[in-house]
Image (spheres, helix red, strand yellow):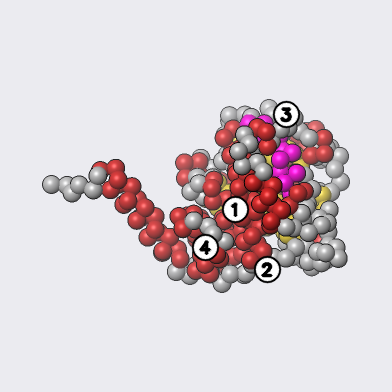
Amino acid sequence: MGFGNYSHEAHEAILRGRANVPAQQVFRQQACHPLMNPKGVRARESRDSADHPSSIGIVFALDVTGSMGVIPRLLATEQLPKFMKVLGDCKVIDPQLLFMAVGDATCDRAPLQVGQFESTAQLMDQWLTWSYLEGGGGGGGQESYELALYFLAQHTEMDCWVKRKKRGYLFMTGDELPYPMLSKHVAEAIIGDKLDDDLKVEEIIAELAKTIVPFFVIPDFERRKRCEARWRELLGDHVLCMESPQDVCFVTSGAISLSEGFVADLDALTRLLRDASAPRERVSAAVRALTPLAESLGRNGHSAASAVKDASESLAGSLKRLFGGHDKK
């Protein structure tokens, strides 16, 4: 998959057309769309073509349990064209996006939904909005992230890797822990794969990382408390802790830009995001979220300190408004 050309104008037009449409009318599925059912799927393919000779596969695996549905809604109503614009400004000429929806295999009706790799605005939007935002989850502090990771490790084929040994990218959003093991019974029931034994999540990530660079994206400070430590054990500096779901497109596109060396450091990334018309406070928040990654890559520059300064000024302004600017006597 991945044929056709991307148009930023067409993508913006799609979003303008639903500016005042309730979210439930954008995401209309009441069950897993038949074409997103992963059972029996051999592979989702990201392929080169005459239009896209240098394709790169990028996956958004979106947690759709509980309150996590806010991120797919943001992507479908305002954010995704911004992500694509930053990639375009970085000269990522042939990105192909695949959307997945992730739930809990112990209790949800649709614990895994998988779209196709696409290049056009219309088809990216189609798979995103075909996702069933079930809003479930088991309430036990774990979701079936390892099931999605397994599918990507075993059931994707990307020419960026096959032809050029260049890995794709995964951005998995979430606010819970993975299950420590992928049950062989779950793998067979949901995907159709017959495994000899259960698989450790560490084994799955090691296999996935051969072909895809995985990131786990946590939506805000409050939710990072319950899952950051475990995900850092698994992924290190590829855990991106945001301050708000509103930062998702800037943080994810920034992670690709830094990892690929499209920007020299956080200073260059700051300029890039501002050129993409990102609000100053969102740029600063994105830089703070990306600072651990940038430091691990040797690309931190000076913007990390500026972002901290912006955060301090914002806090001071909030306190001033709260207390009316009165000095303590």
Pinpoint residue 25: horizontal percent, then vertical percent.
67, 33
Q: Residues within 10 Å of mark 1 (few under 14, many from 20)?
A: many
Q: Which residues are magenta?
A: 124-135
Residue 106 in view: no
Query: What residue did someone put label 1 on?
Result: 249
Query: Who's the residue at 68% across and 68% down the image?
Result: 91
| Number of numbered tags placed on the structure image | 4
Q: From where the camera sits, is residue 302 visible? A: yes
Q: Between disc 3 and disc 4, whose residue precedes?
A: 3
Give coordinates of residue 191: x percent, y percent: 81, 38
Front: mark 3 or 4: 4
Residue linked to disc 4: 274
**Distance of mark 3 from mark 4, alpha carbons?**
38 Å
In percent of width and height, residue 59 lies at 71, 51
First in sequence, mark 4 or 2: give its number.
2
**Label 4 vs label 1: CA separation?**
13 Å
Q: Give x and y (percent) for residue 34.
A: 82, 35
Q: Amino acid at mark 1?
A: Cys
Q: Residue 16 versus residue 64: which sits nearer the camera?
A: 16
Residue 134 inside the magenta-drawn segment:
yes
Q: Which mark is residue 91?
A: 2
Quickly name the residue at label 3: 30
Residue at image coords 79%, 39%: 36
> In the image, what residue type sits under mark 4?
Arg
